[in-house]
Image: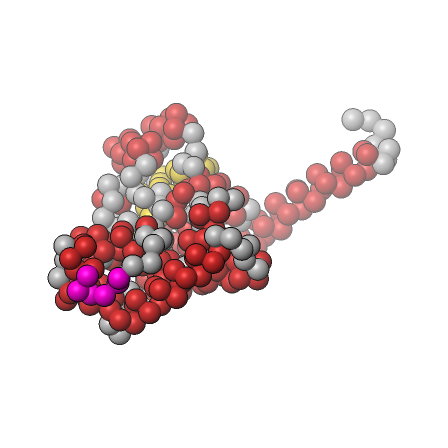
């Protein structure tokens, strides 16, 4: 793993700035860009930094408060402490327990934010849409595609007619075969994935309803959908260099699964038992065959 990434990963102040980046104004983002990329110790006084960054001292103060500090001086105290740790890390390998703690903290931040923005009323509506649709198509590409495939696997096990598509051509073909009883689930953290957007538009022209799972409520794909389930994200989370990008999406899938399963749970339990029996039966057959128990194949 790239050492510069690992050093950054240990800087909680910079990570905190990144996690709040999307909520910042343009001026605050310009300040954040400097502090996130900076590796040098210098005069961080508000007077000097206002000159270096061409911003007012009051802007620096508001930036600090946006990041959760009482004021600019408290932010700089934390920043200088972490910057010193960065410099030491350049020549010393960090204890694995420290790195584990950083991963844990990142997951906890996302988990807390995911549940904070979760709209249970909306989840009930979408679960009902899943329950009343004759066919469900899930579109996703890259890391979002992995989440789409997990969605398919989980819901198929309890009787849903659901298919996940991660190939651009297959998305478009399946979208062209959609109808008024089809529900589209568009999975895209950025909300701008071109092949997903085009497939959603094709399906909408056929009368299908669409739900978008994304980190950006104002994204292009979101604007095409009847429901937009927003998930928590960090800056550049979709690159996969911090934690698994699909984590937030999978959490929402779990919540949707719980609500969907609660509706007619007896029928869905029976379907789950049927699929479980089929999987186990296939495994038992292979075991017998490997042990010589099956004479005729």
Picture residue at 58% right of the left edge, 50% below the top = 272
Start-end of magenta stretch: 43-48
Q: Percent from the top left, x then y, of residue 222?
A: 26, 45
Vertical arrangement, residue 275 with respect to residue 54, above or below: above
Looking at the picture, does residue 216 appear above or below residue 208?
below
Pick the residue in front: 101 or 71.
71
Reply yes or no: does residue 46 show up in magenta: yes
Q: Residue at x 19, y 55 (%)?
A: 52
Coloration of the structure image: secondary structure
* Residue drawn at x 19%, y 61% as measured from the top left: 48
Q: Would you identify the image quadrant in which residue 22 lies?
A: bottom left
Left or right relative to 285: residue 163: left
* 126 relative to 288, above or below: below
Q: Nearer the viewer, residue 189 or 244?
A: 244
In magenta segment, residue 278:
no
Q: Is residue 295 left or right of residue 140?
A: right
Q: Is residue 77 visible?
A: yes
Depth order, front residue of 128/291: 291
Q: Quadrant of the C terminus?
A: top right
Residue 283: x percent and y percent?
72, 40
Does residue 257 appear in this view? no
Q: Which residue, as the protein is rendered here, is positioned at the far bottom?
A: 70
Asked which quadrant contains residue 128, the reply is: bottom left
Of 29 and 163, which appears nearest the observer?
29
Say if 132 sits above or below 71 in the image: above
Question: At x 35% / y 28%, what residue is drawn?
Answer: 172
How many labels, in total?
0
């Amino acid at each position: 793993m790239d050492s510069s990434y690992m050093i950054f990963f240990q800087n909680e102040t910079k990570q905190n700035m990144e996690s709040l980046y999307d909520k910042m104004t343009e001026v605050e983002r310009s300040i954040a860009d400097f502090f996130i990329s900076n590796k040098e110790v210098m005069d961080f006084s508000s007077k000097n930094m206002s000159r270096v960054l061409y911003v007012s001292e009051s802007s620096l103060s508001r930036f600090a408060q946006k990041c959760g500090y009482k004021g600019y001086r408290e932010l700089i105290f934390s920043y200088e402490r972490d910057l010193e740790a960065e410099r030491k890390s350049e020549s010393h390998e960090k204890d694995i327990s420290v790195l584990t703690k950083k991963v844990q903290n990142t997951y906890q931040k996302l988990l807390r934010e995911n549940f904070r923005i979760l709209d249970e009323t909306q989840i009930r509506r979408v679960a009902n849409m899943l329950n009343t649709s004759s066919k469900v198509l899930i579109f996703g590409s890259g890391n979002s595609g992995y989440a789409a495939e997990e969605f398919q696997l989980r819901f198929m096990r309890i009787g849903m007619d659901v298919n996940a598509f991660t190939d651009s051509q297959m998305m478009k073909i399946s979208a062209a075969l959609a109808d008024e009883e089809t529900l589209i689930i568009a999975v895209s953290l950025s909300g701008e994935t071109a092949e997903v957007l085009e497939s959603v538009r094709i399906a909408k022209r056929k009368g299908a309803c669409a739900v978008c799972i994304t980190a950006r409520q104002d994204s292009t794909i979101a604007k095409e959908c009847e429901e937009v389930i927003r998930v928590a994200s960090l800056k550049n989370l979709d690159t996969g260099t911090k934690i698994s990008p699909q984590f937030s999406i999978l959490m929402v899938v779990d919540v949707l699964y719980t609500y969907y399963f609660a509706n007619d749970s007896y029928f869905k339990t029976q379907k789950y038992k049927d699929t479980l029996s089929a999987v186990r039966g296939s495994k038992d057959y292979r075991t017998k065959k490997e042990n010589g128990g099956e004479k005729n194949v």
